[in-house]
Each structure stands twice: as C-alpha cells, then as structure tokens.
Image: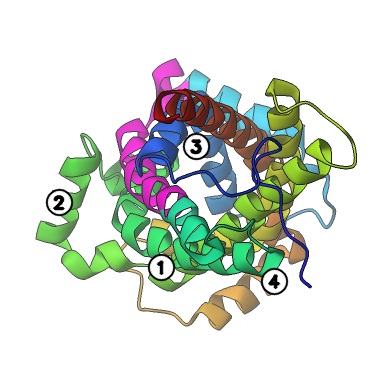
Amino acid sequence: MAARIRTSPSSSSPSPPTPFWFGGAASCVATLVSHPFDLTKVRLQTLTEKNPPRHWLHLGPNSMISIMWKIVRTEGPSALYSGLSASLLRQGTYSTIRFGLYEKFKYVVAKDEKPTFGQLLFCSTAAGILGGASGNPSDVVNVRMQNDGQLPPSQRRNYKNAIDGMLRICRDEGPGVLLKGLGWSTNRAVIMTVSQMTSYDLFKDLLLGPLKFHDGWTTHFGASLLAALVATTACSPLDVIKTRIMAAAAKTDKRIPALTIIRHMHRTEGLSSFFKGWTPAFIRLGPQTIVTFIVLEQFKKYWHAIYY
C-alpha cells in the first residue's frame, strides 16, 4: 500500500478545502518582503559578461550585495521595488491558481483519506501547469520592469505600472508577446509547485511524525525553509532561461530556439550561467516561502476555527 501523507495530526481525514484565494493573498504579503531580492535575481540573470570567471564565487552574496548597492546608488532606494505592481499582479494570478487548485485537487483525489505521495505529485503538477500559464502575461511585464533600470536610457520601456505595461505591449508589440516564454514559464511553474508544495507537505509530515514536532510556528518555519532550498535548486536553470527570453526586446527576439539559447549560454558564459542569481533567488525564495506558508497556515487555522 502506498504511504499516506499526514495532512493534520489531529484528524483522520483531509480538512475541507479553504477559500481559493488564501494562497494568493499569502503570496502577496510575502512579496512585499521578497521583492528587492527578486529584482536583484532578475538583474543578475540578465547580466551578461564578455569574460565570465570560470568559478562559482561570482554567484555568491558579494555579487548580490554589489548589485543591490549599485541599484540604490544609481537609481535610488525606491528602485528596489521597481515592478512591484507587476509582481503583486503575478502573485494574484499565478499563486492564487496554483495554491488554490493544489488544495482543491488534494481534497478531490484523496476523498476521505490522506493523500499519497503520488497524489501530491499529480495535484502539484496539474496546479503548476494551470498557474504558470495564467501568470505568464504578468510575469513578462514583471521581468521587464525589474530589468529596465540596467538598460541604456534609449532602450528603457518605462512602464508606469503592470496594467500600463500590458496595454503598451499589446499596442506596440502585439498581444502574442505576453505569451513570450510560456513554455519555460509553465515548466518552471510545474517544477516550482512540485518542489515547493510537495516538499513542504513531506517535510511538515516528517517534523510532525517521526521527529515529534508540535504543529506550530517552528514546524511551519522549518518545513518552508527546507522547501525553499529544494525549490530554488530545482528551478534555477529554467528560471534563468525564462528570464533571458522574457527580457529580450521584441525587435531583436527572432524566436530563437531554446536549445540555441542554452548552447550560447554554455559556450559564452559557462555552466554556472544557468545558476546565475542562485543566492539572491534563495534569499528571495526563502522569505517568500516562509512568509507565504506561515501566513497561509494562519489563514487555515482561523478558517478551520470558524468552520468547525
């Protein structure tokens, strides 16, 4: 018999699904904390070097701090929150759908039983596909707004906000541009959802079960931190490629095959280019994941108190 995953230490069956918007709301709260690190990650991923060093040290904290300091010095402190409206819009679509569907799917497939590992994988994969596809337009705008500051003034798009960015893209470049990088974005969303949500459930079950932790803040913090480590490592290569595709100007983007981009990155920048921005990505995803799951768990706690 397949191993069953603990969903609640105090119940023998899954709790009724919580409101669909809980995950998106929790993610928006977390975005207010993590956005500067997300912006730094995008800047590092789109940074190209003629003679990149052939080691991993340039991916460390010093690079992240240098980029953040350069942003503050040249663009002002408020630039660390460039593209915040697009980031919030993305979480409001992408995260709302993937978190909401993940919880709904778990409740549907498990019936009155605890979900198995295979069921968790199925639920997270399906939720990731739908969430990634729905969040792609806002993700395109988000990447462009975050990357705008390091472009030459003549190439900057200067979107006022996420809605302005979408309208201008549709008017100047065509609606199809909002689907740029859809395949990579969806693949990343699947990997993110599987590695983040499934691993969180597994780590939480481990802490509550064999390790005898109490179902509280410590357990939620530990499980979400470990989930962030898994998700960052799993998503980094796809995230870098997706960011390069989305940041490209329409006039220079000739729908170059992804394999061509991968070969070019490997040949000119080295293998480490696929993990550019790993440290700020983890520093960003750590707080993002921790705050998201802690807030989400609190939402669930209050909901269940009212429900029961």
Q: Which residue is disc 2 drawn over?
A: 168
Asked if the residue at tag 1 contacts the one at tag 4, i.e. Cβ–Cβ closer than 8 Å, the answer is: no
Magenta range: 74-100
- Examine the structure image and report whether residue 93 is included in the region drawn in magenta: yes
Where's the N terminus, which quadrant? bottom right
Which sits in the foreground, 181 or 254? 181
Q: Is residue 212 magenta?
A: no
The relative height of residue 163 versus residue 295 in the rendered view (above or below) is: below
Tell me how far mark 1 sits from mark 2, CA to CA: 18 Å
- Would you name the residue on which mark 1 appears? 181
Q: Which of the pair 273/13 is nearer the observer? A: 13
The residue at which mark 3 appears reads as 39
- Looking at the image, is mark 4 or mark 1 earlier in the sequence? 1
Residue at the disc numbered 4: 266
Picture residue at 40% right of the left edge, 19% below the top: 78
Mark 3 or mark 1, earlier in chain: 3
